[in-house]
Amino acid sequence: QVENVKLLDRYGSRKAASGTLYLTATHLIYVDASAEVRKETWILHHHISSVEKLPLTTAGYPLLIHCKNFHVAHFVIGQERDCHDVFTSLLKLSQPVKPEELYAFSYNPKMSKESREMGWKVIDLKLDYQRMGIPNDYWEITDINKDYEVCSTYPPEIVVPRAATRAVVMGSSRFRSRGRIPVLSYLYKENNAALCRCSQPLAGFSARCLEDEQMLQAIREANPGSPFMYVVDTRPKLNAMANRAAGKGYENEDNYENIRFKFIGIENIHVMRSSLQKLLEVCEMKSPSMSDFLTGLENSGWLRHIKAVMDAGVFLAKAVREERASVLVHCSDGWDRTAQVCSLAGLLLDPFYRTFKGFMVLIEKEWIAMGHKFSHRCGHLDGDPKEVSPVFTQFVECVWQLMQQFPCSFEFNERFLLEIHDHVYSCQFGNFLGTCHKEREELRIFEKTHSLWPFLLQRKQELRNPLYRGFTAYKELQPNTLPFSFQFWCGMYNRFDKGMHPKQCVLDQLLSCLSHKLTLEDDASELENKLPFLDGPLPREGCSSPRAGPAAAKALTPPQHCGEGAAPALSNGPSLGHQRHKESPAQPQDL
């Protein structure tokens, strides 16, 4: 506990707050003593990405904290010793060394063991494959990887072509980087076109593998409606050629029958990490002009990278839907760029993945089960900083960009995305710990921690999109990916800036209107249910609904008011656009 600590407003529009700083086992808590109403700022230790001591000022010793959820806190501490103690404590608390030190292993909400175990069963990937019609004549769910003999970073059960024998699977495994063989990601039932994923082949300049060629042939033949299939390398061609010199690389079209090869050109994790850092520097500028901000945003390259990922997802979706062709996707190891584009393609093709449950299934299937290295990419433990990269952040932003173009097509709202993004870094739940299914089993994640998904499903009311029209809005999404279609996501990168000019939240107003609409509908239904039980003298003409009972009009519309105008008839379901009520917190015309 440290007294007389100042919390600076980077916009300088308000006087610095003065209060007390507390360090608990899991959080840094700042209590503003200068405010009339108690204000608290909570920062989870696992959210802290860096702690920096700045040069001494006349006010004291500054401490700058950057968080992985883009919160920036600037404290000024009066005593040097206190500042040093807080600095060293935060460094230790924010950089755990062992997985057992992560928050999820100590987080213990009031929940029974049975409820916790059921929470891990909310998402069942087998049900998603059954929804696609698998198993069928061409595809099967196999437990060939139950002992992780095929691939240590794949789940125990994978979906492969029924025509692929065990020898073909094992042979392909030896020819693919880290054994990540081609497996099914999504089957488009309308035409049997399949979206598959894998890692790069160990081809070098001339190596080939008969079993791997047979595996791709089995994938192509599982789609009788197309004479060819695409093989998509999401890396820039120059990068892939450099990997070829190291004995890896990409497929030789001469060795594979009826494939069309294509490079996409998404940059690697190091370029993305650098781009995000440049973007955050722009976001933290104190008083930028519009020109400076836009120039900085352009120079960061961030939105160009978002566009590249989106373009790749659009290409995959079009190939599957319009060309009716199966597609095999890979990058280097098949757990970063491959996860991004496969999950985006699924989102574009299938409205189920745009629901609460469907989006959770998508993340479980394409990211968690298929071995995206959350622990490394998010820096959960004190490790190699070069392994950290905003791969999942880019995917979440791509989803948000789609929501801007198709506001009626997603069941969830922006807050849902932000909640998931925050918890990827919070380590409060076990879903995103470790790097693969095998590691999560070794850490006993499913026995010792809680799943995030039940907690989010309990909050559906506040996380829902009031404009959602269900599956009828758009079955498939075909977004515009021209540069002007991409926006800066202020709600992600500047959401903690309290000094920014506050503006009315349209989402809050819509949710409030929707809640009020549902309340009115319930009241109307309750009154209508009472009508058959009411009796009495008939009301004066024009003072009741045709459906109202004799006494209902008397009860609902007093006779003395009839001369001034009849009360409106009750409606069981006013629409959002036509609702009018004097107590409504926000009328539709204000939105």
Image: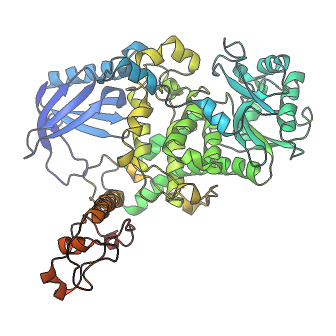
Q: Is residue 39 left or right of residue 108?
A: left
In the displayed image of the protein, which residue is found farthest to the front?
Answer: 536
Viewer-side residue, 291 vs 359: 359
Q: Quadrant of residue 330?
A: top right
The residue shown at (84%, 20%) is: 165
The residue shown at (30%, 46%) is: 496
The x and y percentages for residue 313 are 65, 47
The answer, for residue 54, to whether it is visible in the render is: no
The x and y percentages for residue 251 are 83, 33
Q: Quadrant of the N terminus?
A: top left
The x and y percentages for residue 296 are 45, 53
Identify whether 14 is placed above or below 584: above
Q: How many labels sit on residues?
A: 0
Viewer-side residue, 43 vs 437: 437
Viewer-side residue, 114 vs 511: 114
Q: Quadrant of residue 55?
A: top left
Q: Is residue 380 left or right of residue 202?
A: left
The residue shown at (49%, 59%) is: 407
The answer, for residue 403, to whether it is visible in the render is: yes
Q: Is residue 149 left or right of residue 563?
A: right
